[in-house]
Image (tube, helix red, strand yellow):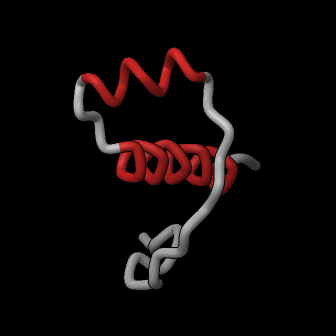
């Protein structure tokens, strides 16, 4: 199966708007926001790639 994206591509900074309560709670739990966003985006990309 072909990769969905180039995993070796460099990372770039991005500015996002996030619900403040959600952000505070995830920070309190030391959830890695970048890794979580990348995982979620990969899942969404896979859905689009799988669609007929």
- Residue 7 vs 42, above or below: the answer is below
Taking the spot 48% from the left edge, 46% from the top edge, the residue there is: 37
Give the image location of residue 44, x and y in percent. Answer: 60, 44
Taking the spot 45% from the left edge, 83% from the top edge, the residue there is: 10
Relative horizontal placement of residue 51, taking residue 24 as reference (left or right)? right
User: Residue at the bottom extreme?
Assistant: 9
Give the image location of residue 35, x and y in percent. Answer: 35, 51
- Residue 18 vs 20, above or below: the answer is below
**Depth check, front residue: 14 or 37:** 14
What is the number of callouts on the image? 0
Taking the spot 71% from the left edge, 47% from the top edge, the residue there is: 51
Which image quadrant is residue 17 in? Answer: top right
**Depth check, front residue: 21 or 33:** 21
Quarter of the image where the N terminus is located: bottom left
Which image quadrant is residue 24 in? Answer: top left
**Depth check, front residue: 7 or 26:** 26
Give the image location of residue 31, x and y in percent. Answer: 28, 35
Give the image location of residue 21, x and y in percent. Answer: 52, 15
User: Residue at the left extreme?
Assistant: 30
Taking the spot 40% from the left edge, 76% from the top edge, the residue there is: 7
């Amino acid at each position: 199966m072909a990769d969905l994206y180039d995993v070796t591509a460099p990372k770039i900074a991005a500015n996002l708007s996030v619900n403040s309560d959600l952000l505070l709670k995830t920070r309190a739990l030391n959830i890695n926001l970048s890794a979580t966003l990348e995982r979620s985006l990969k899942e969404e990309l896979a859905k689009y790639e799988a669609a007929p």
